[in-house]
Image (cartoon, rainbow, N blue to C red):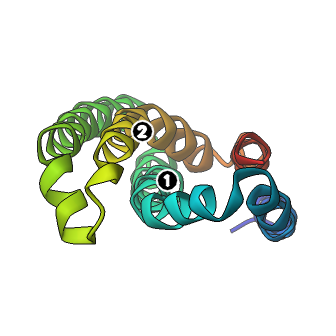
Amino acid sequence: MSKSNHSQVVKGALLLSLAALFAKVLSAVYRIPFQNLAGDYGFYVYQQTYPFYGMAMILALYGFPVVISRQVAEKKALGLNKEAKDVVRNAFVGLALFSVVACLFFLLCADVLAAFIGDTDLAPLLRLVGLGFLFIPILSVFRGMGQGEGEMGPTALSHVGDQLVRY
């Protein structure tokens, strides 16, 4: 790895680390005002449904992009630009299928899942959370593609943006 590439990797890692730290601070800060605004029941609903939303976001923002970025970077390093584009296209199609299946699961099984949790009133909210799975292909592919090309700025910006939207 050349000195220039090494410097770019270090800068990218630093940028992502700062974005993650800022996002964690935002995450900690918004919980108390949220509970005050939503009340105990609103906070309870949040606590019950957030793990499912969190699962979708972990897959979309961290899990799948890492795999895509690694494959894109490997192809680009070998000068296989067409194959790198194929990786991106195939990832999008595969993730789109996965996302539709996950969304349908939540739409069709929300009543059963809510009963398992012990609160059937959560079913409509679980259906709503299921719609979030439809964003996985877009988020994953754009993050993975950018990271695979060494562009960490959009990833850091979207990470902070995600936290600001939640806030």
* Discs 2/1, front: 2
Q: Residue at x 41, y 61 (%)?
A: 55
Note whether 17 is above or below 138 in the view shown. Answer: below
* Rendering coords of residue 26 (x, y %): 84, 61
Determine which of the numbered discs, if any, sits on residue 57 in the image.
1
Give the Cα separation between the discs numbered 2 and 1. 8 Å
Q: Residue at x 41, y 57 (%)?
A: 59
Note whether 36 is above or below 161 in the view shown. Answer: below
Q: In the rendered image, is residue 6 in sight?
A: no
| Image position of 45 (left or right of 102) | right
Q: Residue at x 22, y 45 (%)?
A: 106
The residue pinned by badge 2 equals 132
| Image position of 134 (left or right of 23) | left
Mark 2 in CB contact with mark 1 (< 8 angstroms): yes
Which badge, 2 or 1, is on the more N-terminal residue?
1
| Image position of 79 (left or right of 4) | left
Q: Nearer the viewer, residue 63 or 162?
A: 162
* Rendering coords of residue 125 (x, y %): 39, 43
Q: In the rendered image, is residue 153 in sight?
A: yes
